[in-house]
Image (tube, grey):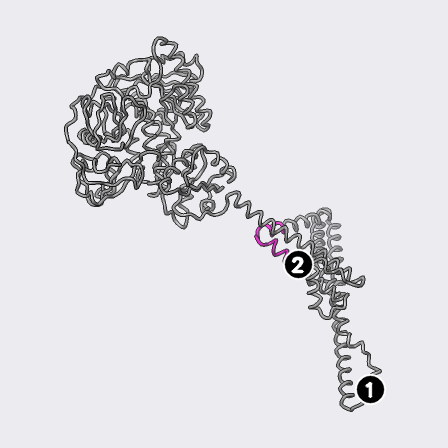
């Protein structure tokens, strides 16, 4: 401890003496320069006085004698001393940084000696601190590099000017500084310098100028590269109005963009902005590889996190965090937010966070319910594709003041290019009422919900002449028990069971075939809120196995099921390729097993085997025929549809594409979400396929307007039909006033609040 203290004291004294000597030297030089300037000033004054006296006395011949004792070099004393000051100033300027660094090094050395460590460690630590401070300075301040370059340039020009003034014959300091600037700006300007001193200084200034301009070019190049990278990486702000913003990236984006392009087709295109946590170039390449025409719609990609508010200005938990970020936008939101969520239980929480501007689409639950409806009514998925997409007819809401006071029955036939489906009742807070009562009269402020080709493609006309007659009085056939197989496991399978419970007759069986152990299934169903023992219409039968292993499937009586649903398994839902491959493999294995067990029967899958038949053509026999069981597969990728058609599989549900269609419709008009909610709910109005015998007699000639009037007598809205010899469904048909002869094998698509013939 004593040695350390002594060393520290000695170091301090040594440092003090060193700086005292430096200070004394600088002070002495300064004083000598100061006094030298005073002497020169006095000598110049004496010379001026003598010259003045000689001129006043008229001395001419003796002038040389008088001035002989005068030193003419006094005229240059001031210049000589000012040049000396320039030399000292340059030396002083160059020495100052080294002296400052040496002072800091000595302090660090004394501190390390007092702590009993080696001095070289203290000096190394000092270097690290200085490097850290410099790094922080350049990192924190955006213009630090430019400022440092400016200061270095000024120091180089001034120091070079002083040095040139000291060693050259420059007439003034300002002239020398200007000459220094020319050497910095153009290194070739120093070539005409004469003398060793001027040449050394000129070359030094020119080398410094080359370094300065190299650094300047580097800064300019970095700034341009950074700006280009910002544009390339999608970090710049988007300045657009009336555009649609998509937050996040998923496999559904291609289908969603296609639907938005179709929606903007009538307007000549639109603007869609995609903000996702991917590279801009990568997103643009993926979008460019999409196999459809954008029809004038521009897609702008920006890279960033939707969870970061700064990027916004440029699983459900993720969606809720995005909604929270959107609510934090200070400028406020001028549109509405459409959120896709997976679990119905999270919908109230997202709406609570987002408020009135948030519209939720519960994708997973909607598809589950649609799968059940399609199992009971094959072909319904293809009808939903026609309605939800913007390629054919879709839902629109508009007010028509000229229809105020008109009965809804007359409104049905007032639009030759649209099918009215409901009313947005102004007196009920704007609630949309699907399939209103027969005698409802439109009030002031009411708006009409229609299915039409486009927003501007329809308008009311004077009421056409329609012959009103009663439809056949048929009693709906009783419901029969069904035997249904579910292959795979979904998170919302408990909701699917509850929906199925409301549709099927008592005594129905639901076979569940998946890899989840039975005990774990029961626990998951109970956690989802399903009371399995309380089911009245359905009996659950559990089987464990892998749906892509043939020997596991062979343990099931596949030929006895009325409907077989192949779900996109929860374990593979994040990979659409693997999920669709699994579904397609299961489909082929099931059809193969059925064909071997029933080799003498036609096991080809019909497009609409249940819906297209009348009651008199033994629908009950078709339901009980085990070899005619309906196989429905959930497909995530629309490209898999082609493979399904090749393998003679015509009943499928494009779940992701249907969800994208729904999202696009709600993004276009948030009011449509209320319509979709009711149509997909297990209660209220729904979409059904009904036989023609409920609306007409055999070979009866009627117009579609007359069919709509008869359908409304049954509290139904008829929106389209499918002829017996055709595979495609026509929604919102043209020529509604033109009569045609119908067949009892035709079917009609209706919106109804009840359907007892399932």
Q: Which of 659 and 139 lies nearest the eye of the viewer?
A: 659
Q: Which of 464 and 447 lies nearest the eye of the viewer?
A: 464
Q: Which residue is mark 1?
A: 63
Q: Judging from the image, what secondary structure is the residue with disc 1 in?
A: helix
- Which image quadrant for residue 671? top left
Report x, y in % for residue 368. Answer: 35, 27
Q: In the rendered structure, find residue 153 and report the number of the disc placed on it.
A: 2
Q: Which of 620 and 31 lies nearest the eye of the viewer?
A: 620
Report x, y in % for residue 440. Answer: 17, 37
Looking at the image, residue 21 sits to the left or right of residue 493; the answer is right
**What's the magenta region?**
133-150
Q: Residues within 10 Å of mark 2 (few under 14, many from 20)?
A: some
The answer to whether the residues at label 1 and label 2 have Cβ atoms under 8 Å apart is: no
Q: Judging from the image, what secondary structure is the residue with disc 2 in?
A: helix
Looking at the image, residue 373 sits to the left or right of residue 1; the answer is left
Residue 142 is covered by the magenta coloring:
yes
Closest to the camera, between mark 1 and mark 2, is 1
Report x, y in % for residue 753. Answer: 23, 29
């Amino acid at each position: 401890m004593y040695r350390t203290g002594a060393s520290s004291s000695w170091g301090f004294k040594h440092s003090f003496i060193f700086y005292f000597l430096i200070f004394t030297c600088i002070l002495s030089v300064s004083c000598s320069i100061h006094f030298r300037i005073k002497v020169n000033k006095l000598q110049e004054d004496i010379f001026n006085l003598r010259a003045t006296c000689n001129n006043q006395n008229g001395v001419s011949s003796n002038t040389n004698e008088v001035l002989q004792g005068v030193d003419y070099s006094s005229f240059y004393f001031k210049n000589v001393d000012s040049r000396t000051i320039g030399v000292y100033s340059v030396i002083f300027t160059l020495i100052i940084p080294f002296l400052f660094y040496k002072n800091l090094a000595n302090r660090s050395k004394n501190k390390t000696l007092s702590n009993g460590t080696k001095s070289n460690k203290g000096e190394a630590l000092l270097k690290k601190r200085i490097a850290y401070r410099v790094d922080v300075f350049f990192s924190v301040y955006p213009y630090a590099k430019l400022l440092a370059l400016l200061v270095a340039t000024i120091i180089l020009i001034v120091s070079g000017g002083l040095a040139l003034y000291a060693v050259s014959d420059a007439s003034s300091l300002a002239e020398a500084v200007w000459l220094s600037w020319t050497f910095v700006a153009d290194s070739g300007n120093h070539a005409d310098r004469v003398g060793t001193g001027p040449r050394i200084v000129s070359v030094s200034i020119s080398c410094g100028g080359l370094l300065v301009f190299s650094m300047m070019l580097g800064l300019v190049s970095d700034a341009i590269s950074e700006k280009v990278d910002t544009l390339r990486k999608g970090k710049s702000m988007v300045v657009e109005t009336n555009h649609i913003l998509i937050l996040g990236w998923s496999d559904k984006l291609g289908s969603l963009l296609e639907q938005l392009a179709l929606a903007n087709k009538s307007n000549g295109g639109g603007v869609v902005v995609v903000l996702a946590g991917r590279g801009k170039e990568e997103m643009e390449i993926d979008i460019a590889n999409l196999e459809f025409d954008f029809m004038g719609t521009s897609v702008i990609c920006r890279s960033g996190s939707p969870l970061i508010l700064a990027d916004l200005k440029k699983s459900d938990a993720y969606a809720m965090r995005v909604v929270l970020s959107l609510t934090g936008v200070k400028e406020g939101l001028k549109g509405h937010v459409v959120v896709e969520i997976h679990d119905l239980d999270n919908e109230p929480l997202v709406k609570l966070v987002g408020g009135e501007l948030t519209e939720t689409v519960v994708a997973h639950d909607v598809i589950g319910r649609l799968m059940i409806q399609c199992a009971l009514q094959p072909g319904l998925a293809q009808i939903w594709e026609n309605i939800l997409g913007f390629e054919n007819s879709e839902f629109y809401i508009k007010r028509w003041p000229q229809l105020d006071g008109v009965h809804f029955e007359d409104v049905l036939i007032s639009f030759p290019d649209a099918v009215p489906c409901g009313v947005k009742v102004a007196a009920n807070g704007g609630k949309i009422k699907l399939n209103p009562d027969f005698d409802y009269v439109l009030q002031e402020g009411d708006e009409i919900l229609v299915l039409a080709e486009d927003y501007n493609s329809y308008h009311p006309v004077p009421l056409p002449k329609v012959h009103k007659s009663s439809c056949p009085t048929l009693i709906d056939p009783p419901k029969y028990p069904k035997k249904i197989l579910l292959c795979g496991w979904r998170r919302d399978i408990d909701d699917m069971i509850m929906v199925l419970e409301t549709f099927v007759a008592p005594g129905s069986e639901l076979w569940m075939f998946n890899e989840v152990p039975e005990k774990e299934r029961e626990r998951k169903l109970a956690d989802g809120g399903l009371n399995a023992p309380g089911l009245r219409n359905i009996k659950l039968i559990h089987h464990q196995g892998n749906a892509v292993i043939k020997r596991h499937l062979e343990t099931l009586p596949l030929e006895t099921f009325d409907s077989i649903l192949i779900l996109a398994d929860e374990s593979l839902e994040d990979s659409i390729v693997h999920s669709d491959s699994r579904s397609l493999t299961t489909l082929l294995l099931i059809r193969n097993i059925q064909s071997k067990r029933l080799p003498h029967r036609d096991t080809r899958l019909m497009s609409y085997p249940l819906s297209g038949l009348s009651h008199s053509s033994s629908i009950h026999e078709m339901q009980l025929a085990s070899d005619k069981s309906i196989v429905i597969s959930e497909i995530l990728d629309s490209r898999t549809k082609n493979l399904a058609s090749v393998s003679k599989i015509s009943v499928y549900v494009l779940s992701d594409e249907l969800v994208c269609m729904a999202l696009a419709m709600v993004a276009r008009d948030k009011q449509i979400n209320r319509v979709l909610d009711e149509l997909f709910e297990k209660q209220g109005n729904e979409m059904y396929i009904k036989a023609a015998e409920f609306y007409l007699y055999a070979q009866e000639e009627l117009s579609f307007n007359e069919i709509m009037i008869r359908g409304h007598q049954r509290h139904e809205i008829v929106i389209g039909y499918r002829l017996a010899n055709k595979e495609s469904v026509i929604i919102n048909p043209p020529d509604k006033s033109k009569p045609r002869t119908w067949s009892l094998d035709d079917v009609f698509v209706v919106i109804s609040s009840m359907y007892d013939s399932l």
